Amino acid sequence: MKNAWLVRPFPHGAKRLDEFKTQNIVAVGWPGIGDLTNKSREDIKEILSVVPYQLNGLELGNAYATIDIFVNRMQVGDFILTPDGDDIYFGEITSDYYMESTVDNDSTGYPHQRKVKWLNNTSRKNLSMPLRSSLKVHRTTADLSAHVEEIECLANGKEYKVEKLNEANVISVNYPLRPDYTISFNVPSNISKDEAKRLSNYLETLYFVQ
């Protein structure tokens, strides 16, 4: 089953959308930490906690979760969504993770890369409201697999028709996350096992402290 991922075009704080499109890549920053091939999530956490970045707390949690998605969780064949203002670009991952040493420095700073095939682009207004809301996450990368059907349609230049659910087709879910905090959300009454799995995978990324 294919997944879908957000990758913002600002590795190391610089806009690289032109490089993304002309070189058929997506990339994240954090130069100076070496090749992350075969590095686990915990390895990445350790690397970021020492020189040169010496991250900790929330900043460390966000950083290593972001890099782990790019290095370990993305797979060849998955879809990429890259937003640039109102413009939305779609691609398909065509390579495993690799490090490009020629841009592994502070002035360029996008050494951690994957090859992609760019497929299509559209306007943000053409996205469903749930997908637009998911793009508000404050990370360089994020799991958008809960929207993979919509992303696949748009990536292939097709119109995505959002199924309208009436109240009878919606189940309200309340989950006691903590003794003093309950999460409430709605799911369709005919939610499938695959859809529930994608939702679970998405929720796994929503933490900010280890």
Image (cartoon, rainbow, N blue to C red):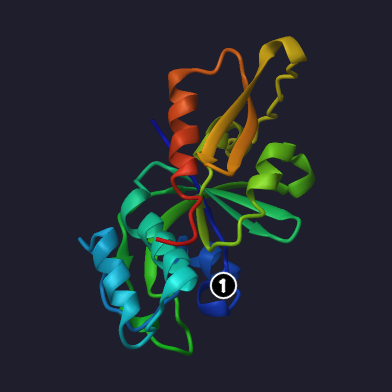
Q: Position of residue 28 (x, y in %)?
A: 45, 68
Q: Position of residue 14 (x, y in %)?
A: 58, 79
Res 175 → quadrant = top right
Res 71 → quadrant = bottom left
Q: Quadrant of the C terminus?
A: bottom left
In the rendered structure, the answer to whether residue 55 lies left or right of residue 83 reads left
Q: Position of residue 74 (x, y in %)?
A: 37, 49
> Which residue appears farthest toward the right when viewing the image?
125
Q: Quadrant of the N terminus?
A: top left
In this view, the residue in front, 14 or 206, is 206
Seen at 30% across and 83% down, the residue is 50
In this view, the residue in front, 13 or 103, is 13
Seen at 23% across and 63% down, the residue is 39
> Which residue appears farthest toward the left when viewing the image?
38
In the rendered structure, the answer to whether residue 38 lies left or right of residue 192 reads left
Q: Position of residue 203 (x, y in %)?
A: 49, 42
Residue 106's place in the image compared with 144, above or below, is below
In the rendered structure, the answer to whether residue 176 lies left or right of residue 98 reads right
In this view, the residue in front, 91 or 201, is 201
Q: Classify mark 1: helix, strand or loop.
A: loop
Q: Is residue 40 visible?
A: yes
Seen at 75% across and 19% down, the residue is 164
In the rendered structure, the answer to whether residue 47 lies left or right of residue 84 reads left
Residue 169's place in the image compared with 148, above or below, is above
Residue carrying label 1: 16
Q: Is residue 28 visible?
A: no
**Residue type of the residue flagged with mark 1:** Arg
